[in-house]
């Protein structure tokens, strides 16, 4: 069960990072939803950093799971993953008005906790 939860957590994070970037950055830029200016630059920068951070961290987790699934049971790796989820949730709550990034960060947190508990058995 641990293996499936680990792949689900990091795969979900990778997928949602790609989708967040595609929807909130690329799609809105191509449709011209925001007038050029400082606020638009900050909007695209925040969403790009948020989404690409999730994508890269998710890929790193998937790579690590493929190389050494046992390492993902260790406390330092779990702690970094939980802190990353908490950081993304804090950014989403404080700076992003949409509910989807909040849900994505929360689900990643729940999946990481579930994978950790399954790995402790």
Image (tube, rainbow, N blue to C red):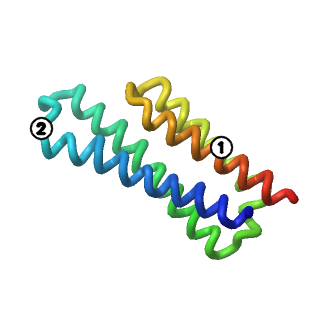
Nearer-N-terminus badge (2/1): 2
Element at label 1: helix
Q: CA distance from mark 2 to mark 1?
A: 35 Å
- Of all residues, the one furthest to the bottom in this rendering is 67
Residue 28: image tag: none
Circles 2 and 1: CB atoms closer than 8 Å? no
Q: Residue at x 79, y 56 (%)?
A: 118
Depicted 113 relative to depicted 98: above or below: below
Dot 2 corresponds to which residue?
32
Across and down, in percent, residue 25 comes to 27, 43
Residue at point 29%, 50% (across, down): 22
Dot 2: element = loop
Residue farthest to the right, as pictured = 121
Percent position (x, y) of residue 11? 53, 60
Judged by depth in the image, the label closer to the viewer, 2 or 1, is 1
Neighbours of disc 2 within 10 Å: few (<14), some (14-19), many (20+): few
Which residue lies at the image location 80% right of the left edge and 51% below the top edge? 117
Q: Left or right: 37 with respect to 21?
A: left
Along the line of sight, the residue nearer the viewer: 70 or 121: 121
- Quadrant of the rendered structure where residue 97 is? top left
| Left or right: 55, with 76 as reference point | left
Of 99 and 65, which appears nearest the observer?
Answer: 99
Q: Residue at x 23, y 48 (%)?
A: 26
Point out the image quarter for the N terminus: bottom right
Q: What is the quadrant of the C terminus in the image?
A: bottom right
Marks counted in the figure total 2
Q: Which residue is mark 1?
A: 110
Q: Residue furthest front?
A: 1
Mark 1 Cα shell of 10 Å, populated few (<14), some (14-19), many (≥20):
some
């Amino acid at each position: 069960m641990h293996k499936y939860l680990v792949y689900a957590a990091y795969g979900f994070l990778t997928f949602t990072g790609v989708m967040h970037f595609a929807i909130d950055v690329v799609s809105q830029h191509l449709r011209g939803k925001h007038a050029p200016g400082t606020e638009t630059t900050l909007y695209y920068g925040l969403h790009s950093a948020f989404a690409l951070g999730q994508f890269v961290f998710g890929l790193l987790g998937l790579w690590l799971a493929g190389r050494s699934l046992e390492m993902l049971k260790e406390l330092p790796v779990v702690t970094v993953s939980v802190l990353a989820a908490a950081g993304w949730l804090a950014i989403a709550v404080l700076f992003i008005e949409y509910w989807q990034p909040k849900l994505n960060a929360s689900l990643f947190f729940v999946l990481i906790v579930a994978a950790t508990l399954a790995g402790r058995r």
